[in-house]
Image (cartoon, grey):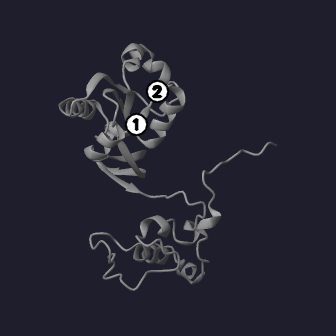
Amino acid sequence: MIRSITQQKPMEEIEHLLEGMDRIFVIGCGTCTTLTRTGGVEQVAAMAEDLSARGKVITGTTVVPVACDNLTSDILSEFGARMNQADALLVMSCAYGVQTLASQLGQMVVPAQNTLFIGKENAAGQFNEICTQCGTCVIGETGGICPVTTCHKGLVNGPCGGTNNGKCEIDSNKDCAWTMIYNRLKELDRLDSMRTYKKPRNHLGEPSPGKFLIPEN
């Protein structure tokens, strides 16, 4: 299952973002940040307690089912009075959830998290990034393993000189992406794919913000 992986900002940064705003309503998310324990019921309660200890007045808290859902503003309507008493809404969700709320609510919205990446849950509590959504997919020639994401250096034409016994020189606990690709292509009898030279990636050719429109028939 794909999840948005987040990490709580340092409290000093959150305090800075909330500077001049004394009354706070805290919102968590019932999906990704609940799963990663960065914005579920317990974390929202802990945040409210921490902010109270730092002199903030908490006008209310809640955990919405899906912060990035367009129905979130309707779900929050029952908290309207307590939200209106707040100078800001502190949102403990991914950046997508924060932006969704900011677009739907006429109040100051402050993120409590840094969004790290979109991850796949490989085991309970273990998430790995598998795609950076770079727009230049090369996995058709690498046995379905993405070197842009899996290799710490994002190399697309084989390993660097630092690979050691199949491990990455940056993280010795991590398998070298290009050793994995070699082994996969060998199993598939497709090692010739490694001889295909891939041009350097043109980062300037990746427009941001990205847009996609399904062509009309």
Q: Quote the CA–CA distance across marks 2 and 1.
A: 10 Å
How would you rate the neighbour count of disc 2 (Cα within 10 Å): few for under 14, some for 14-19, many for 20 or more? some
Q: Is residue 165 above or below residue 71?
A: below
* Residue in the foreground of this view, choosing between 193 and 120: 120
Residue 162 visible in the displayed image: yes
Q: Quadrant of the C terminus?
A: top right
- Residue at 48% across / 69% down in the picture? 147
Q: Which residue is mark 1?
A: 110
Q: Residue furthest left?
A: 53
Relative to 73, does residue 179 appear above or below in the rendering? below
Residue plotted at (41% across, 18% down): 84
Q: Nearer the viewer, residue 109 or 29?
A: 109
- Residue found farthest to the right: 217
Q: Residues within 10 Å of mark 1 (few under 14, many from 20)?
A: some
Of the residues shown, which amino acid type is indicated by label 1? Val
Q: Is residue 36 visible?
A: no
Q: Position of residue 50 (x, y in %)?
A: 20, 34
Task: Determine the image quadrant of residue 194.
Answer: bottom right
Give residue 183's quadrant in the image. Answer: bottom left
Disc 2 secondary structure class: loop
- The residue to which callout 2 is attached is 107
Q: Label 2 sits on what residue type? A: Gln
Instruction: Name the image quarter holding residue 95.
Output: top left
